[in-house]
Image (cartoon, helix red, strand yellow):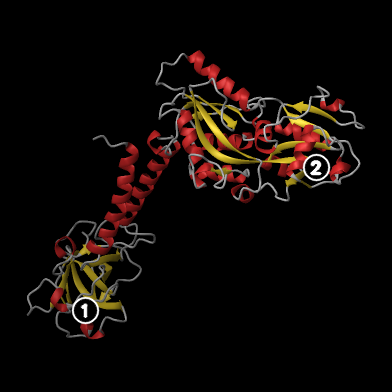
Amino acid sequence: MSVSWGSLAAILGLAVPVAAALWEFVLAGRKRLGYRVQLDTTIRDSAASGPDTTVLQRMQWDGTNLRDPSVVLLRIENAGWRPLVAADYVAPANDPVGIRIAFPGRRVVGMTVTERSTQVPPTFFVPGAEGFETTGRVISLPKVILNRRAHYKVLAVLDREEGFSDPEFPEPEVSAGVVGGVRGGNIKKTAYYPFASRQVRWLLASLILVSATQSAFTLAGDDEAAPLDCTTGTLHLSGSTAFAPVLREAAKRYEETCPKAHIPLTATSFKGSVDGLGALAAAGADARLPDGRGLGSRLAFSDGPKSDGRPRLLPRPVALSLFTLVVHPDAGVEDLSLKQVRDIYAGTVTNWSQVRGNDVPIHLVSRNPGSGTRTTLEQQVLDGGGPPRVTTADCAGLDRDRPGRCEVGSTGTLLDTVAATPGALGHSEVGAAAAHDDVRQIRIDGYPATLEGADQGAYPYWQTEIAYTYGEPPADSIAAGFLRYLADEVGKDIVRAEGHRPCSELDKPLLCRPSTS
């Protein structure tokens, strides 16, 4: 089984902190006796290079001149996490000495304890105390009780031994040990670290290295870290203009999540449900795919089911979409009965005053044939009836004094046209209409365009938004991945934000229609 560098970095990222914790709380937490040589200096002139010294005043001890005096200051400390008692020192029970310090080439002429922690009893260091003495070149220290972090300091005055001719003195030799201590219990030379101990600094450096390695793999775009359903390739979307806002936002977010996916969209990507289905069928035919193999690079979205004659286009319900009638504010109406709506589109009501509105001719602005919004209006609201004939090919040519009808190619153009034409009535997807401040939505029989109204069977203008594929797309294709994304939580949030309801939230997701219909 192969392990990637990213996985190895993650393992190290876990192992290093564990090792640090074991060191600090298990190893370093045991008994540990340490010492520091804080001062070791001669009293000779700095220009001297040997034992023949020149000093400002000859140093004496008990009236005797010293040949080559030196001063040593040592700090004895509990460097572990547990207290040290007399029984912890490695020495016979009847031996009062716990630590011995030898000074090769020098003899001890005097010593004293200059500093001690408040917890260290002073009785250990009074003259005549057991284990506290000097003999030749050796200082003996008693088995001092040291709590955690406790210490004491010993200042010694020494002189060169006769016959020792080396210009520099060797370092002091400190001998001691504790039972059950770290690394055999021998006393260790310690040092002061203003930041952290050497071992801890190594561990911190290792952590930084591991973090930098993991960051490098992340920035490099490790394929193994790609989110679920991220695919590669280019996806072409087409179809419903009413569902276009959802698809544009979803495509943008999908590309952000999956950097190797590309979903190009233009102003003409969504020209209507029928056009989208036709483009998908043509692309599949051009690909000449054998039976059982689907096209993985295209999706078409339609307001409602396809017509007959395209057997290789397979449907997948995505959302329940709401539509609404929209009117110019000058019409003076906000609510129409279902009969009044049908009468208007049948041409028997041609002025808003006939339905208790203002004296303004009614101008019908419709989507082109093939629009899912228009087809849904005819099927769900007009009971299969269609609008009257077109009176002008250009909506700008509508006669302001007489009723008329024109057609446009997109939802956005329809809303703009209704807003600019007094007396105009059109139809739109709810989200787009709500975002257009210059038009008014029409209630039908007193019910606004809401999902609750559709669920209760009170509001009739709705349709199932269906995604169509050419055959069954491969599971690893970008078409299949994008469909899964729309059904996931992020995709459902986008669908809801545009005023639609995800099919998975309905009582019968596969039918994707109001429960009472």
The front one of 166 and 407 is 407
**Image x and y of residue 6, in percent:** 35, 39
* Mark 2 or mark 1, earlier in chain: 1
Residue marked by disc 2: 438
**Which secondary structure, mark 2?**
loop
Residue marked by disc 1: 145
Locate residue 273 relative to residue 40 in the image: left or right: right
* Residue appearing at x 75%, y 42% in the figure: 339
Locate residue 513 relative to residue 98 in the image: left or right: right
Asked where in the image residue 327 lies, by quadrant, the reply is: top right
Crowd class of label 2 (few under 14; some 14 to 19; many from 20; radius 10 Å): some
Res 172 visible: no
* Three-letter code for the amino acid on which mark 2 is drawn: Asp
For the residues labelled 2 and 1, the Cα–Cα distance comes to 89 Å
Res 285 visible: yes
Asked where in the image residue 423 lies, by quadrant, the reply is: top right
| Mark in the foreground, 2 or 1 | 2
**Image x and y of residue 124, in percent:** 21, 83
**Image x and y of residue 148, in percent:** 27, 73
* Three-letter code for the amino acid on which mark 1 is drawn: Ile
